Image (cartoon, helix red, strand yellow):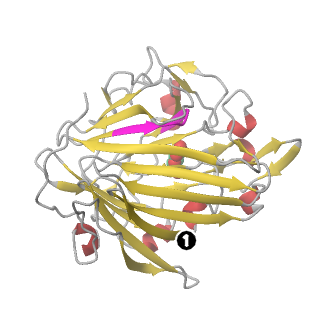
Amino acid sequence: MEPSRPAVTAPGTAPGLPSAAAGGPAHARGDARGGGRPAKEPFGRLPDGTPVHRWSLENGGTRLGVLSYGGIVQSLEIPDRHGTYANVCLGFARLDDYLAASPYFGALVGRYGNRIGAGRFTLDGRVHHLSVNDGAHTLHGGATGFDKHVWDVEPFTRDFEAGLVLRRTSPDGEMGFPGTLRAAVTYTLTRSGDWRVDYEATTDRATVVNLTSHVYWNLAGEGSGSVEDHELTLAAARFTPVDAGLIPTGELAKVAGTPFDFRRAKPVGRDLRAGHPQVVTARGFDHNWVLDKGVTARPEHVATLRDPAGGRSLRIATDQPGLQFYSGNFLDATLTGGGGRVHRQGDALCLETQHFPDSPNRPSFPSTVLRPGHTYRTTTVHSFGT
Ligand code: BGC
């Protein structure tokens, strides 16, 4: 059943966010014609002086705060069943914290989301050596991925929608990837408060692409503690087991009878301590689920996350074949979030729609190759309810 949306009148306050995020003067207000125009405010500078901005937009009862740095979703505020707003994604209040050490909080991940084994792949007979930043492997596009660049941001409002188009050109050879990749990612807040992400990219040489969004969700509110009681549903009968370096072994294993079976709603923490070797290897869930629907022409519903306490829910629809469910295993109490609370293991989780990790080295997985003359296009829609 579709979760319904409460009528919302009273704005709440997201803890620890700049005043604009909590409905202050710089915040764009939604209106009957489909959301106010996104508003922009300074959010600091990179060490080389490049300015970073924070954009805020609101529509259909959802409020989004986005940084031009890394396309980072710094805040996403939605109401609970009483109409009380909270920021439901992990982020920092200051740019310096993102620059110092962020585990991809809210970031746009590219050129290749998740891992490429041994930091290399062969395409059309040529070996490409990538930036290695995760043991012997390449993670989320290498040491300086798309999450660590300032994007050009263009706001828009149209047809009852408000949004941002983020653009960046990744030069040929960046992090070892071949081809100049022109990427455009559109964040849209729809009339009903969905957050839709449309990715597009073109290249001038054959390359591989796998873009995703790395939001850490906690539907009870950022800094509210563990998400182990959140209930998760994943429309996937198989997952891709990994080796000690979290690289898929190539097998598509059945979830039936294992902790990986989320085909019916299950608390995230229920089987975390059952000792399944794959859960032990990853220190929790950090795997790609093979979505039953496969690659589809349009986004289809694949995941539901619900906080039974406050009632907030998230539904994800995608056209992608995989979803990385990462249960926040490496949050180790060394980072303090925007609300002033320390994040510990399991205080948030990620649901990253994607092609499978290490696909460039696995011909049996759906292809991630993009060639000149073709356009990479994918869409993921996040819907919220109570
Ligand atoms: C990966 C994890 C990684 C996390 C933060 C996830 O997408 O699967 O292994 O620790 O991102 O980098």
- Above or below, 209 against 91 in this view is above
Q: Residues within 10 Å of mark 1 (few under 14, many from 20)?
A: many
What residue is at 67 percent from the left and 30 percent from the top?
365
Residue 323 shown in magenta: yes
Give the image location of residue 209, x and y in percent: 66, 48
Q: Is residue 104 visible?
A: no
Residue 35 shown in magenta: no
Left or right: where does residue 301 sit relative to residue 298? left
Q: Amino acid at mark 1?
A: Val
What residue is at 27 percent from the left and 72 percent from the top?
27
Q: Main secondary structure of the magenta part?
A: strand
Q: Which residue is mark 1?
A: 150
Left or right: where does residue 95 sit relative to residue 48? left
Quarter of the rendering containing residue 386 = top left
Give the image location of residue 152, x and y in percent: 54, 71
Q: Which residues are magenta?
A: 315-324
Left or right: where does residue 187 sit relative to residue 47? left
Q: Closer to the camera, 333 or 356?
A: 356
Residue placed farthest to the bottom in the image?
49
Left or right: where does residue 63 sit relative to residue 359? left
Is the N terminus in the top left, top right, bottom left or bottom right quadrant? top left
Say which element carries label 1: loop
What residue is at 24 percent from the left and 42 percent from the top?
385
Give the image location of residue 128, x and y in percent: 81, 50
How many numbered marks does the figure carry? 1
